[in-house]
Image (tube, rainbow, N blue to C red):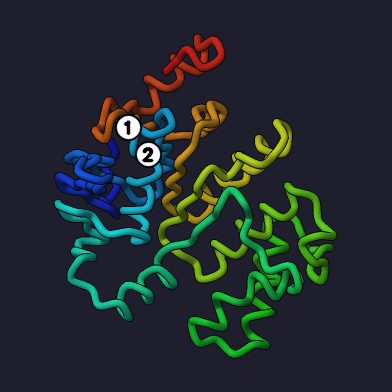
Amino acid sequence: MSTNPVVIHTEDVERHYRLGDEVVKALDGVTADIYEGEFLSIMGPSGSGKSTFFNMIGGLDNPTGGKIFLNGQDIAELSERELAYMRCNNMGYIFQTFNLIPVMSATENVALPLIFSGLPVEEAEERAGEVLTRVGLGDRLHHHPLELSGGQQQRVAVARALANSPRVILADEPTGNLDLKTGEEIIGLLHELKVESNVTIISATHDMKMLSHSDRVLWILDGKVDRIMERDELEIQVGTMDGEEVL
């Protein structure tokens, strides 16, 4: 178990949906700690509650029951303005579909959250250029998304997530739309950022390649924590797994 401070703590988190007369328990009492500077992968089959839990800890959805704490703060106690500030300044988001604005250059896409946070346009674009260079796109600053490969677009998305120097990066299936080689490059890039900046990486994923870079893997099954594996256990699994039989 990590000796680093706890960044996110969830306590008996539930998320229920009503489907006609039936109540569907997408999450059914999930308690977990996520530590500063770790690479945590959240895994589970489709419909397990993995993505729901990911959205809960990212402040993108509200739990039906239980509590979620970020740096000791119960996020349910935050106003909409305070929650928006938390998302903008403490968290960076990377999505499977990149979510880049087609009519904007790479620099403009990355600068946008900085401008929303109050930084002057010139400073925001200067910072965007620095972060894009950091992720290997220093020669693509003025290219638009359709002029970039899928891997390059995901690097822009990574740069955008880093723009406000967040403490936590949430990556939702970050390799889902990428080929094998490019997916491995993006996973490696996220690992490098974790090591260099001590940023916490939380990824909801089906990609077994994440195992080789994860400090822990949290498996969700039927809305509950099925198991949590630490780094030393993962090394054994990575060395012996055959396809996806590790699950």
**Farthest front residue?**
20
Q: Position of residue 170 (x, y in %)?
A: 45, 52
Q: Position of residue 23 (x, y in %)?
A: 20, 42
Dot 1 or dot 2, earlier in sequence: 2
CA gap, disc 1 and disc 2: 6 Å
Task: Please indicate whether residue 160 sits to the left or right of residue 76 in the image.
Answer: right
Q: Is residue 200 above or below residue 87?
A: above
**Closer to us: 192 or 208:** 208
Kindly identify which residue carries mark 2: 50
- Discs 1, 2 touching: Cβ within 8 Å: yes
Rendered image quadrant of residue 2: top left
Query: Which image quarter holds the N terminus?
Result: top left
- Is disc 1 placed on a helix, strand or loop? strand
Q: Is residue 186 above or below residue 136?
A: above
Task: Please indicate whether residue 55 sits to the left or right of residue 18 in the image.
Answer: right
Few, some or many C-alpha atoms within 10 Å of disc 1 (few <14, some 14-19, many ≥20)?
many
Residue drawn 64% across the image and 87% down it: 121
**Closer to us: 166 or 182:** 182
Q: How many marks?
A: 2
Q: Position of residue 99 (x, y in %)?
A: 62, 60
Kindly identify which residue carries mark 1: 220
**Closer to us: 35 or 224:** 224
Task: Please indicate whether residue 151 sits to the left or right of residue 32 in the image.
Answer: right
Q: Is residue 140 above or below residue 121?
A: above
Q: Could you tell me the amino acid type at mark 2? A: Lys
Rendered image quadrant of residue 22: top left
Residue drawn 72% across the image and 55% down it: 153
Residue drawn 50% across the image and 49% down it: 171
Few, some or many C-alpha atoms within 10 Å of disc 2 (few <14, some 14-19, many ≥20)?
many
Query: Which image quarter holds the C terminus?
Result: top left
Q: Could you tell me the amino acid type at mark 1? A: Ile
- Is disc 2 placed on a helix, strand or loop? helix
